[in-house]
Image (cartoon, rainbow, N blue to C red):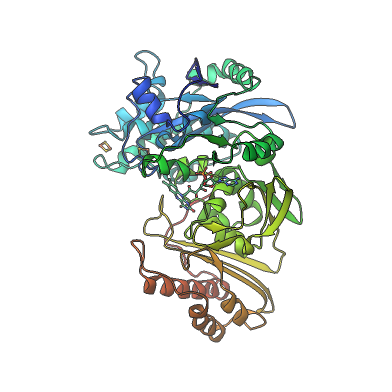
Amino acid sequence: MIRFLLNNELITLDSVRADVTVLQWLRERRLKTGTKEGCGSGDCGACTVVLASVVVDDATNTKTLCYESINSCITFIGSLHAKQLITVEDLAEGDKLHPVQHAMVEEHGSQCGFCTPGFIMSMFALYHNHQAAQFSGFSEPVLAHLVDRHLGGNLCRCTGYAPIKRAAIKALNNIEPDQFIHREHETINALQSIEQQLPMHPRFLLPGSIEELASMRVQYPKAKLLAGGTDLALEVTQQFNDIDAIICIKQVPQLLAVSVDEQRISFGAALSLNQCMRTLRQTIPSSEAMMLRFGSEQVRNQGTIGGNIANASPIGDLPPLLLALNAELELHGSQGVRTLNINEYFLDYKKTALAADEFLRAVHIPVPDNSTQVFVHKISKRLDDDISAVCGVFCLSMQDNTITQARVAFGGMAAVPARASAVEHVLQGEQFNEATVAEAIAALSDDFQPISDARASAHYRMRVAANLLKRCWLQVTVSDAAVQVGDYVGG
Ligand SMILES: Cc1cc2nc3c(=O)[nH]c(=O)nc-3n(C[C@H](O)[C@H](O)[C@H](O)COP(=O)(O)OP(=O)(O)OC[C@H]3O[C@@H](n4cnc5c(N)ncnc54)[C@H](O)[C@@H]3O)c2cc1C
Ligand code: FES
Ligand code: FES
């Protein structure tokens, strides 16, 4: 049985197929057609809805609601368990538009209107998150960046973005408590009472502990593991496959844990990309620019660190970062838990060292010491919501300009994300100067023979990898080197 709130209505589903998407359910079963279908693959944002879930502050035991935008076309219905689903139909109170809708009308932010519900929902999520941001001292100059970041996953083909951005900024400058804030206490109580009931759907399994997950993995060997679904759901919406049974790992507390000490950062495998980014940027600030360009806000809210590693795409963005940082993976199987260096994890195209009965449990990242600089560069055709052609990460420890240790990793250069061992060998023990960089560039062809595909040619990939090495050297030697084409300010 899957239970959630559709705005304020308690929904109980016990016979729905496991692979029905939220978008299908809304439009076909509930006839709520305000939420649109554009691409069906998470790329356009027309189907954006907002999920509210209860967050408990451990120190004060205060409960609040966290509002996150997601793409309903790539979210399976069972993922809604114990959450509040808010759609565009829920925002207005009778004839009174929600402030984000009102601002959109005033700024003429809509023409054909197809994309508008999606934009409105992304703005609504930001409107709620911005309330918290204001309290942590966020200033006006970052507003435009926040809007870019939160609306980067929404495409409009006719209005143009300027009026939409103006509408978002206007709404954020005039925040007032809306009906959702007024009902927050009531919603939290309703969601918590659902949480206490055991979900028991025969095909959408929601283990509540790591032990339960491990035993379900053995008991249902054919069931697909689901985290955020931003890769898995495409098997249904793009390849038209059926998924008969799903084990969703998003409610296993151990997989949602974060811990940070002086030695290492540990992430549970089911933590969202946005949750990981917020922690990682404190220790490795250079990771933030890349993480903010990972998909869109919707994808970062849904997708997980474990999903990105397990999916084993050669152009996944986190693997090069984790390879260069020398991360350890914790794998949990029927024989117990084992730890594996991520360098031993990717075996061949989409083939990993994960055994059939295993799942990724945690990722441990050693904290780089003070002599180490981490350079993270994602190269894609667009700044927002685009997959990398090449992603290069360089972790260089230096003393008096001598490279004492080099870990260099690339995505997009081979069938798997991989370390560039020949390049590392050249760099290690040498002065970081133009001659060393030239030698390292020459060594790139010992490490990689990339392929040409729709995203980039082999020649382009080699050229970019070489230029990224040069870029790192410029970053170290020229203090004001302009190495970024675009930038975001954190928030
Ligand atoms: C519009 C769009 C944009 C995207 N942009 C980017 C991008 O910029 N960069 C990028 O790298 N990727 C991108 N992706 C891909 C995707 O978002 C990421 O790979 C994401 O991290 C996947 O996480 P998930 O939780 O959604 O995985 P899921 O789809 O839930 O799972 C992916 C695979 O991993 C398995 N799995 C999940 N968790 C575990 C676990 N703990 N243990 C074992 N197996 C597990 C699942 O069974 C499945 O086979 C994009 C996807 C979309 C739709
Ligand atoms: S329909 Fe395009 S993102 Fe969902
Ligand atoms: S208003 Fe027509 S697509 Fe945006």
Residue at the location (29% across, 41% down)?
A: 156
**Callout count:** 0
Q: Nearer the viewer, residue 362 or 110?
A: 362
Percent across and percent down for residue 473 are 54, 75
Could you say which is closer to the camera, residue 202 or residue 340? Answer: 202
Q: Is residue 467 left or right of residue 457?
A: right
Q: Nearer the viewer, residue 216 or 95?
A: 216
Res. 140 in view? yes
Q: Quadrant of residue 320?
A: bottom right
In the rendering, at what x and y percent does residue 305 appear? 58, 48
Q: Is residue 489 above or below residue 240?
A: below
In percent of width and height, residue 367 lies at 70, 59
Q: Is residue 456 above or below residue 228?
A: below
The residue depicted at 52 percent of the width and 81 percent of the height is 443
- Observer-nearest of 280 and 220: 220
User: In which image quadrant can residue 73 be found?
Assistant: top left
Q: Residue furthest top?
A: 94
Indicate the quadrant containing the N terminus: top left, top right, bottom left or bottom right: top right
Residue 79 spot, x, y in % from top left:
52, 31
